[in-house]
Image (cartoon, helix red, strand yellow):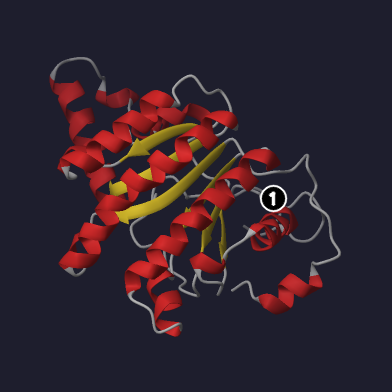
Amino acid sequence: MFNNTQNNQQSEEHLDMNRIPEHVAIIMDGNGRWAKKRHMPRIAGHKRGMETVKTITKVASKMGVKVLTLYAFSTENWKRPHDEVSYLMGLPVKFFNDFVPELVENNVQVRVMGLIDQLPAQTQQAVHDAVKDTAHCTGMILNFALNYGSRLDITLAMKQIVDGVVDGKLDPDEIDDQTISDHLMTGFLGQLADPDLLIRTSGEERISNFLLWQIAYSELVFTDVLWPDFDKDVFDHMILEYQHRDRRFGGLDTTNRGDTQ
């Protein structure tokens, strides 16, 4: 768990701009608790969280991150109260209407993965318009996981692979890790599909059905900061923590600090 004490310890350190993670994924958690602490309705936390998305998107883009994947709405989130779900479905409309001009200005391209066709028509339209309006941008990819679940992602990929085998387009003996990666919803990201760093806010230390295949060798950082309070300084500290890690991908430690996995 990454906490404020560690934040203070790293306050004098500087980021190594040559070691910025190319793909950062974030489980944005704690909106409801942020609102409850302030005796406000949960939707107030989601509204504030939307402003945090704008802030961190611009920070990550300027830092040199190539892909920022945000867990916006899971396939399990439909279980939440109807009024909250309705509000969450309306957020993309307001978010993209307000933020797309800034995204274009910052050369950020919007992509969305998940079962988009199951979303309300207005939400679908807002998503499609944002993707279309930023398609020409060549900078950071802001990738929203919306109505997304990793087990479903893997299941759908397996079905596509089976169909390919049945149709004679795939040889079963040639199916490998890359085949599976290519058929997942992150396949369009190519070599950037697997996050270098996964962050979860709010103090929870679980993955919650997010990018289960893709994070096999990601660095995981958990912080007790609630998402609406997550700002540039906290994000910088997350990147510093990542830069302190020794990524061996199952190989040996080349820094003489050990020889175990």
Question: Would you name the residue on which mark 1 appears?
Answer: 252
Q: Residue at x 28, y 42 (%)?
A: 114
Instruction: Indicate the position of residue 164 as horizontal and vertical percent values.
Output: 20, 22
Which three-letter amino acid code belongs to the residue tagged 1? Leu
**Quadrant position of residue 186:** top left
Q: Residue at x 27, y 51 (%)?
A: 90
Could you tell me if residue 177 is visible in this image? no
Could you tell me if residue 168 is visible in this image? yes
Give the camera-side residue of 68 and 90.
90
Instruction: Indicate the position of residue 29 as horizontal and vertical percent values.
Output: 43, 66
The image quadrant where one finds the C terminus is bottom right
**Quadrant position of residue 206:** bottom left
**Is 4 situated left or right of 153 in this image?**
right
Instruction: Indicate the position of residue 136 as horizontal and vertical percent values.
Output: 48, 19
Q: Secondary structure at mark 1?
A: loop
Give the camera-side residue of 59 and 222.
59
